[in-house]
Image: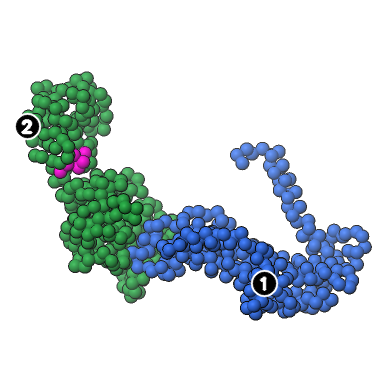
Chain colours: A blue, B green
């Protein structure tokens, strides 16, 4: 903005505050709910200020879980989610950066076809191919395993495309200089490409970690053993109380806990994340 | 240290386009060769073929006593300086210099010594631990040259290394490159489109046009006896006047030629001179001025000392023996 009028500033700030309020209110309500007992929420009025049961509720969730819904303690589910999200994020990055490397730097027959095949898979997210994918995973005996949770989600056209664009911005002279300097393809990849895509890798990691963490349908489908429940799918199972009222205070406490790792990743990698999305100069 | 011999080298691209044809150059050990020509003349392609970055479609390239046609760039024992420097942005200057040596398995102590030597020669010692982005254009240029020097290669290849610098820095760096090459005595091939750079740097010039060699010779040879109208018009600033001989009927000894070439500085005002010039425009350059005009309908440029006002009509004489005669159709020199 070039204009600098106080009225305009005020309006801008009000709009932003309203936006924040809209986004933050449900989170606040969830937090408040997680600090009360179950009955407080069934009484008709929703409390808007935290109650006294914060420590008790969270300790119970972390320690034991809700036995009535058959879910393990939150700690186990968080660990499962973490393993899945990390496997998905790292796997996606590793696979897509190497395929982008192949597509950009090697002249092999049907190179363009290969690229477009990868690109077309954008049209086939898990939800579309869920039945055949389930069949494949079941036949391979991967149900109830970390491999089953992550491998079907690892291929990524978006990330391949992103790395392709990043590699295309790296000047040809740099590649040629490396060739003259005696760097073979793999050395070039390790010494030049990887460090130059560092910020992009970080940005992508943040996005993919959250994507992996938020997986709901797939883990719900292929995990039957509570040892492999993930937190997001677990919340759903908790809310499905079979004989009785859902224990909202505990569900909300779990939801609050489930939010923490993605938030930590975003905050921890904020600087690199923004740089990776904004920076264009190589 | 090595000679480089190009024998009937040609480049044909996949689409069938011919970029370079029938180029033979015999570059002696320690010689500074400048490939010069307008953009698109194939000079960069030729250099990249010597470097191994482009495949060689025809002919052979020898570096030292090896034919290098099928040898990888890294194994050709050459170092290249690129137009945009091509420094690795994530490495410090020191790492940039050392990278090629490290890849070749040079011992650590040896690398340190060579990097220190190169840094001393190029006066980039204080910047060794900076990243390229923290350096100015001239400093980056020095680092790019340093990367070539540390390798102690058989030949340096320069691809328009000064064209990203401002005019003043270009002159300084030009001198430094010349001085460096004189001290190291490394065979060098230098590509430029700037004829002034070509003249000042070269031991021998190779003037290229349309993928073919127009002339090879020392800068003064090329300047004094251009082999064709193309070379005549390209080398020298302001450019040589090239006019049909019928436009200067009174000039002695030119009647049989199709095209007469006269350098602007070889013309002088002389009331009894054979050429009458109708002045159109005057460009003041400070110490001298360029006078543009027409004689018998043909454009002609004259260099004159700065001074009094220029009249509308001038009589000019040509310095004896300073005319260049060319064939009307082929443009080849005939005298």
Queried whether the magenta region covers residue A7, the answer comes back as no
Which residue is painted at 39% across and 52% down in the image? B136
Which residue is painted at 20% across and 29% down in the image? B300
Image side of residue A196 versus residue B191, left or right: right
Q: Which image quarter holds the N terminus of chain B?
A: bottom left
Is A190 in front, or is A155? A155
Q: Position of residue A230 (x, y in %)?
A: 71, 72
Residue tagged 1: A134
Is A225 in front, or is A191? A225
Q: Quadrant of residue A238?
A: bottom right
Is A97 in front, or is B92? A97
Q: Is residue B285 above or below residue B202?
A: above
Q: Quadrant of residue B25?
A: bottom left
Residue tagged 2: B253
Which of label 2 and label 1 is nearer to you?
1
Dominant secondary structure of the magenta stretch? helix
Q: Which residues are magenta?
A: B227-233
Q: Secondary structure at mark 1?
A: helix
């Amino acid at each position: 903005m070039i204009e600098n009028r106080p009225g305009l500033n005020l309006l801008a700030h009000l709009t932003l505050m309203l936006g924040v309020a809209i986004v933050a209110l449900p989170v606040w309500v969830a937090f408040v709910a997680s600090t009360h007992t179950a009955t407080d929420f069934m009484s008709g009025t929703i409390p808007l200020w935290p109650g006294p049961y914060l420590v008790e509720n969270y300790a119970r969730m972390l320690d034991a879980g809700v036995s009535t819904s058959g879910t393990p303690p939150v700690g186990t589910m968080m660990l499962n989610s973490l393993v899945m999200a990390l496997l998905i994020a790292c796997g996606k990055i590793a696979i897509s950066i190497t395929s982008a490397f192949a597509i950009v730097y090697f002249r092999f027959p049907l190179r363009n076809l290969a690229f477009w095949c990868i690109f077309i898979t954008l049209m086939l997210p898990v939800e579309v191919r869920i039945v055949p994918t389930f069949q494949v995973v079941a036949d391979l005996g991967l149900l109830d395993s970390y491999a089953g949770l992550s491998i079907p989600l690892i291929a990524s056209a978006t990330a391949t495309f992103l790395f392709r664009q990043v590699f295309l911005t790296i000047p040809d002279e740099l590649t040629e200089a490396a060739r003259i300097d005696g760097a073979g393809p793999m050395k070039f990849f390790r010494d030049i490409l990887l460090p130059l895509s560092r910020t992009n890798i970080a940005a992508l990691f943040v996005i993919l970690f959250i994507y992996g963490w938020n997986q709901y349908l797939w883990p719900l489908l292929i995990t039957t053993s509570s040892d492999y429940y993930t937190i997001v799918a677990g919340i759903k199972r908790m809310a499905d109380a079979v004989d009785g009222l859902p224990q909202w205070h505990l569900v909300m406490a779990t939801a609050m806990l489930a939010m923490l790792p993605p938030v930590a990743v975003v905050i921890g990698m904020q600087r690199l994340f923004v740089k990776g999305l904004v920076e264009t100069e190589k | 240290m090595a000679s480089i011999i190009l024998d009937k080298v040609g480049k044909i691209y996949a689409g069938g386009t011919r970029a370079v044809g029938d180029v033979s150059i015999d570059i002696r050990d320690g010689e500074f060769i400048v490939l010069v020509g307008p953009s698109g003349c194939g000079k960069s392609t030729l250099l990249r073929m010597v470097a191994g970055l482009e495949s060689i479609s025809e002919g052979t390239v020898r570096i030292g006593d090896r034919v290098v046609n099928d040898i990888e760039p890294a194994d050709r024992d050459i170092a290249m300086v690129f137009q945009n420097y091509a420094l690795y942005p994530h490495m410090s200057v020191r790492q940039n210099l050392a990278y090629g040596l490290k890849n070749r398995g040079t011992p650590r102590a040896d690398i340190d010594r060579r990097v220190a030597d190169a840094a001393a020669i190029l006066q980039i010692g204080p910047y060794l631990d900076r990243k390229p982005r923290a350096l100015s254009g001239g400093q980056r240029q020095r680092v790019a040259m340093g990367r070539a020097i540390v390798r102690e290669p058989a030949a340096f290849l320069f691809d328009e290394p000064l064209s990203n610098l401002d005019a003043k820095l270009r002159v300084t760096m030009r001198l430094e490159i010349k001085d460096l090459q004189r001290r190291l005595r490394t065979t060098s091939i230098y590509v430029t489109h700037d004829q002034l750079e070509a003249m000042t740097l070269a031991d021998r010039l190779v003037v290229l046009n349309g993928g073919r060699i127009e002339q090879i010779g020392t800068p003064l040879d090329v300047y004094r006896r251009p082999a064709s109208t193309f070379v005549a018009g390209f080398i020298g600033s302001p450019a040589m006047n090239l006019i049909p001989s019928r436009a200067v009927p009174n000039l002695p000894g030119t009647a049989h030629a199709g095209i007469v070439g006269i350098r602007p500085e070889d013309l002088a005002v002389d009331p009894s001179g054979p050429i009458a010039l109708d002045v159109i425009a005057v460009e003041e350059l400070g110490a001298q001025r360029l006078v543009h005009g027409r004689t018998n309908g043909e454009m002609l440029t004259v260099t004159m000392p700065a001074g009094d006002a220029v009249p509308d009509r001038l009589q000019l004489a040509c310095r004896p023996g300073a005319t260049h005669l060319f064939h009307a159709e082929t443009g080849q020199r005939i005298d």
